[in-house]
Image (cartoon, grey):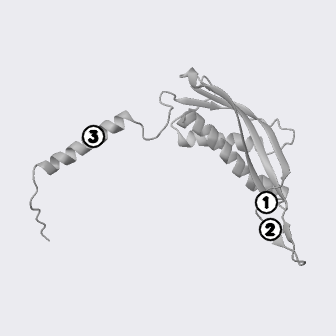
Amino acid sequence: MNFKIKNISLKQPLLIVALFALLGVLNSCYSFTGSSLTDEKTVQINEFPNNASLVNPALSQQFSTDIQNRFLQRTTLKGTKSNPDILIEGEISDYSITPTTISSNTQTNPAGGVVQQAQNKLTITVKVHYENKVHPDSSFDRTYSDEAAFNSNLSQSDIESQQVKIVTERIINKIFNDIVANW
């Protein structure tokens, strides 16, 4: 096959070169990763002990592992145990399961009446100390909390395997965004 290109002027290649030059300038002015961590190289994330009155025995280990994985997998930070640029530590201060009146599930009983299924709410609260040694003005102490409503007929193991994962994932997202995205 022979292809012939007709009517190509000198302006079209110059336009393409100018477009690439503009993209290069924009890329140098703005980081497309959106990370505010530019000079920081190392991070230390200590274990988050569970100091809540109701203790889920696996929560401390799982939360600590999940937050460490989030920072090590989604940033260029390297983990360290000594003299980190960033220190993240804290505690799980509340873990509670309470009945709630919110219900989206209804059933009709044989007598024709409407019966709402009971629901519970899982709430987890985490206190976080974030210390940035490169940019100390970015450091903070904050409390993060989230919750999930679920059907009251879930077993304790279902709550711990499903609902806890949902809530801790949301909390880790908030912490990560506050530190890395700095929105």
Residue 106 badge: 2
Q: Pick the residue in front: 41 or 144.
A: 144
- Residue 101 vertical position relative to residue 139 in the rendered view, above or below: below
Task: Give the structural element (helix, strand or loop) at label 3.
Answer: helix
Residue 22 badge: 3
> Toward which corner of the image does residue 72 lie, by quadrant?
top right
Residue 49 badge: none
Amino acid at dot 1: Ser
Whether residues under marks 2 and 3 lie with C-beta atoms below 8 angstroms apart, the answer is: no
Residue 27 image point, x, y percent: 35, 38
Category of crowding for the residue at label 1, using alpha-carbon neighbours closer than 10 angstroms: few (below 14), some (14–19), many (at least 20): some
Amino acid at dot 3: Leu
Whether residues under marks 1 and 3 lie with C-beta atoms below 8 angstroms apart, the answer is: no
- Residue 128 vertical position relative to residue 17 in the rendered view, above or below: above
Whether residues under marks 1 and 2 lie with C-beta atoms below 8 angstroms apart, the answer is: yes
Category of crowding for the residue at label 2, using alpha-carbon neighbours closer than 10 angstroms: few (below 14), some (14–19), many (at least 20): few
| Residue at which label 1 appears | 103
Task: Give the structural element (helix, strand or loop) at label 1.
Answer: loop
Residue 85 image point, x, y percent: 56, 25
Point out the tag, 2 or 3, that comes first from the N-terminus. Answer: 3
Q: In which quarter of the image is the C terminus?
A: top right
- Residue 148 vertical position relative to residue 44 in the rendered view, above or below: below
Q: Residue pushed farthest front?
A: 113
Side (left or right) of 35 relative to 118: left
